[in-house]
Image: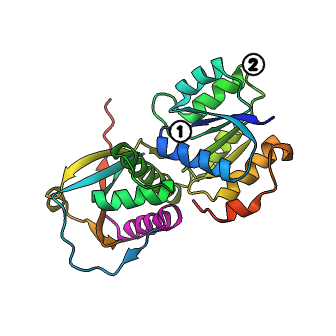
Amino acid sequence: MPEKMMRQLKNVIFEILEDMFFIFPEEENEIVLPPKLIEGNIAISGEERIILRFFIPKALACIMAENFMGEKEMSDQDIIEVIKEFVNMVGGNYVSLIDLEGRMQLGLPQVKETSTKELDKLTKVEKSQIEGHFFGFCMEKEEVVFDG
Amino acid sequence: MGFNVLIVDDSGAMRKVIKKTIKISGFDVDNFYEAGNGKEALEVLKDNWIDIVLTDINMPEMDGITFLKLLKEDETSQGLPVIVISTEKREQRVQEAISSGASGYVKKPFRPEEIKNILTGVIGEEYARKDDEAIEECDF
């Protein structure tokens, strides 16, 4: 994945985390990962298909949800919805940056629980620390094959 | 007497945040109605008097642009002001929304002032209280 694209994505992510969730990346220390993470993803389709994937521990997702909603004690459903919205905002802002002509289509955000081991299967995951928790993301590209 | 607002977004969290933003902006709202997509919004509109709609674009079942076009094609709802609130910042998408009949466009992430200013512009000053202090305390 071109470095420039990852840098652009990183800027978009951290801008949104700061503006809408009031959290900031910190200096990285040794972080113990929980066995499970929340994975959010969204596809951007055009001549090629780009999938943005985000890996967030539940504790951080909970902080994000509380800050976004301005409320305490979020339900699991609230947390899922907030992470979906986060993924949607990153996807929308990122596609606006890489596709000024509006040729690419933004998909719908998906959120699921995933094993932390999943991270080992991925070649390039950008890792950060936020509020003392792990935050990871990556970008995958697929060629789109048209039949007929 | 206040006005009735319909918020259309597939994210319940975002609907809540928009509702909160309108409340802290001091508007005189009688009722808030919510829908998770364009299809649900059309159902809400059948049974309720709505003065203004705030809609997302990227939604399942029926997206915001299709919903907007259907509203504007229908004689009974074509005068209803619709504000689009979307993560889409591309000019082509903004123009598509405006040419489909949107009265305004707010890009996410947004600041509460943006919602307040656009609502004031669309529905008029009479519904907006001059209560800027509350909004300064909150920044989404």
- Foreground residue among A63 and A84: A63
Q: Which residue shows up at 34% across the image and 50% down it?
A: A41
Q: Position of residue A48 (x, y in %)?
A: 36, 48
At horizontal 60% and vertical 34% (from top left) the residue drawn is B65
Snapshot colouring: rainbow
User: Looking at the image, which residue is at 29% across and 69% down?
Assistant: A133
Tell me where residue A50 appears, x and y as whole percent. Answer: 35, 51
Answer above or below: position of B37 versus A37: above
Q: Amino acid at mark 1?
A: Asp
- Magenta span includes A5: yes
Badges 1 and 2, same chain: yes
- Name the chief secondary structure element in magenta: helix
Give the structural element (helix, strand or loop) at label 1.
loop
Chain identifier of the residue bearing label 2 in the image: B
Distance from label 1 to label 2 (Cα)?
23 Å
Q: Is residue A105 left or right of residue B138?
A: left
Can you tell which mark lies on residue B9? Answer: 1
Pointers 1 and 2 in contact (CB under 8 A)? no
Identify the mark at residue B76; answer none if there is no mark: 2
Q: Chain of mark 1?
A: B
Would residue A49 appear left or right of B120 to someone viewing this image? Answer: left
Asked whether B128 falls inside the magenta stretch, the response is: no
Judge whether residue A56 can be spotted in this image.
Answer: no
Counting residues from the start of the chain, the first of labels 1 and 2 encountered is: 1
Horizontal side of residue B65 vs A130, given as left or right: right
Answer with the quarter of the image where residue B64 lies: top right
Q: Position of residue A140 (x, y in %)?
A: 29, 55
Figure quadrant of the C terminus of chain A: top left
Q: Amino acid at mark 2?
A: Thr
Residues rendered magenta in the picture: A1-22
